[in-house]
Amino acid sequence: MTTIQILLFFHILGSFMIAAGAGLGEVTLAGMRRSRSTTAILALANAGSRVPMLTITGALITIITGSWLVSVTGQSFGAPWVSVTYLVWILSMALSAAILGPAETKLHALAVSENAAGREESPALIAAVADMKVMITTHVLSLMVIVFIALMVFKPGA
């Protein structure tokens, strides 16, 4: 195997990890929004709390191997598709860190406390799950995965 093939394998693996995390995030959020049970929401929040391990690891693998691929293949870091990819990557990391991460931490803590208090149904927890900012951010991040794939496949401007 050549260096490029190895880098490409890990680049695609990282991309799958990001896509899987985005899908898992969408599924857990949808399940939480449909549930009124504190226990069920807590179980889904526990599953959703694992998403960052998958997506952050995938994002780091992808950005490192992608940058390395640009370098070894003679591509230009100034090429439009490369520049836009970096911009979208930075925006996705910022959205995840500024909005999604804190909201998920708060939601998980609330689910734990409401469940520990023995509340089978919690209006505060249901309201936290229904937060439009979290839902929109989750959808935007999933859309960004599609943008990444389109940029990698079609390489506009190359």
Image (spheres, grey):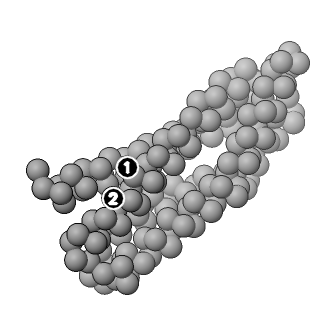
Viewer-nearest of discs 2 and 1: 2
In the displayed structure image, the side of residue 29 where residue 9 appears, left or right: left
Q: Name the residue under label 2.
A: 65
- Indicate the position of residue 142 as horizontal and vertical percent values: 51, 55
Q: Residue at x 19, y 60 (%)?
A: 4
Q: Which residue is drawn at 37% across and 49% down?
A: 14
Q: Is mark 2 on a helix, strand or loop?
A: helix
- Indicate the position of residue 16 as horizontal and vertical percent values: 36, 47
Q: Residue 23, can we see it? A: no
- Indicate the position of residue 130 as horizontal and vertical percent values: 75, 44
- Quadrant in which the C terminus appears: bottom left
Q: Residue at x 23, y 69 (%)?
A: 72
Assess disc 2: are there few (<14), some (14-19) or many (≥20) residues with their C-alpha within 10 Å of its C-alpha. many
Which residue is at the front of the view, 103 or 27? 103
The reply to whether discs 2 and 1 touch (Cβ–Cβ < 8 Å) is: yes
Marks 2 and 1, how far apart in space? Answer: 9 Å
Q: Which amino acid does label 1 sit on?
A: Gly
Q: Residue furthest top?
A: 118
Q: Which amino acid does label 2 sit on?
A: Thr
